[in-house]
Image (cartoon, rainbow, N blue to C red):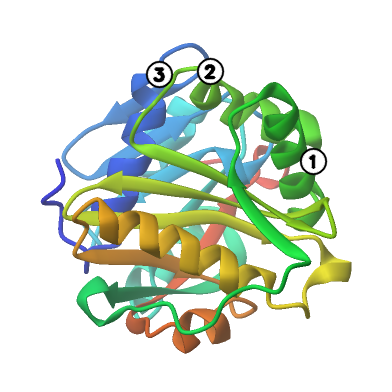
């Protein structure tokens, strides 16, 4: 599984979400020759994922049938104008632009240490996990119940491929992240900082810790899917752009008849 192509918008993302699908419970996955999907049961598109394998084809009816009444998101290459038009015709609407980036960990070294006011730890206890859920919900402006429902099965599974980190400023939990390890690759996602603390360099120090963990576990390359807000800190750490992506959202309440 760890050999999935990093320059493929369905490759490493699929590895991550397959791990969630393997947890069972509310998570269900579907696959055919053209698409792969993960359904969490949460009524928010950010927790239901559609990955299109064939960037020249989209079977909307099959995707909608699988997700039933749930909204979902679909990420594709930004320059695929044919598929973008097809998604629009099938009732999906633009969500946001993101950028896939990669770092060769042979080129990474810690170049600054956090001040004494900043501390970072792995989130293991119930209290830590509760703080992680709260920080992530506040940062992404999403319901805490959604965050808990999606991530909690992972937290209680003792899943060794995921490292959950929490960053404190003056002993207050203010930033969080999730590191997925599949050596020789890794990815960082759900990186978040509470809005009022975003100018303190917390994400930078949190990322340095995650990258150090990955490097110590013989990871060669780390990928991220960065929003416009996060690109600067990734570039500062040495990440390079590999793909320009765009996300489209399907909301059943707004769909047309297909």
Task: Out of 138 and 221, give the one closest to the viewer.
Answer: 221
Secondary element at tag 3: loop
Q: CA distance from mark 3 to mark 1?
A: 22 Å
Label 3 neighbourhood size at 10 Å, few (<14), some (14-19), many (20+)? Answer: some
* Label ID, residue 156: 2
CB-based contact (under 8 Å), mark 3 and mark 1: no
**Vertical order, 37 against 92 (above or below):** above
Quarter of the picture containing the N terminus is: top left
Q: Is residue 256 visible?
A: no
The single residue placed furthest to the front in the displayed view is 116
Secondary element at tag 1: helix
Residue at x-position 69% and y-position 28%? 148
Secondary element at tag 2: loop
Q: Which residue is mark 1?
A: 134
Q: Which residue is mark 3?
A: 23
The single residue placed furthest to the right in the displayed view is 196
Residue at x-position 58% and y-position 74%? 204
> Is 252 on the left-hand or right-hand side of 161?
right
Residue at x-position 57% and y-position 63%? 206
Task: Out of 68 and 218, give the one closest to the viewer.
Answer: 218
């Amino acid at each position: 599984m760890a050999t999935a192509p990093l320059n493929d918008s369905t490759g490493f993302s699929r590895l991550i979400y397959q791990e969630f699908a393997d947890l069972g419970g509310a998570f269900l996955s579907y696959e055919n020759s053209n698409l792969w999907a993960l359904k969490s049961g949460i009524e928010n598109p950010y927790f239901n994922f559609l990955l299109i394998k064939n960037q020249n084809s989209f079977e909307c009816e099959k995707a909608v049938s699988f997700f039933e009444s749930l909204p979902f998101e679909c990420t594709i290459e930004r320059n695929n104008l044919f598929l973008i038009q097809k998604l629009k015709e099938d009732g999906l609407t633009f969500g946001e632009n993101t950028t896939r980036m990669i770092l060769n960990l042979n080129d990474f070294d810690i170049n600054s240490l956090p001040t004494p006011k900043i501390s970072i730890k792995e989130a293991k206890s119930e209290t830590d996990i509760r703080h992680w859920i709260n920080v992530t919900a506040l940062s992404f402006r999403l319901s805490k119940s959604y965050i808990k429902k999606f991530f909690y099965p992972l937290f209680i599974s003792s899943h060794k491929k995921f490292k959950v980190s929490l960053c404190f400023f003056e002993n207050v939990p203010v930033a969080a992240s999730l590191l997925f390890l599949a050596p020789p690759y890794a990815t960082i996602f759900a990186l978040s900082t509470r809005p009022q603390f975003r100018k303190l360099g917390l994400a930078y120090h949190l990322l340095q810790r995650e990258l150090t963990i990955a490097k110590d576990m013989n990871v060669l390359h780390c990928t991220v899917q960065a929003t416009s807000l996060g690109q600067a800190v990734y570039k500062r750490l040495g990440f390079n752009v590999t793909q320009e992506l765009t996300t489209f959202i399907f909301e059943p309440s707004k769909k047309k008849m297909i």
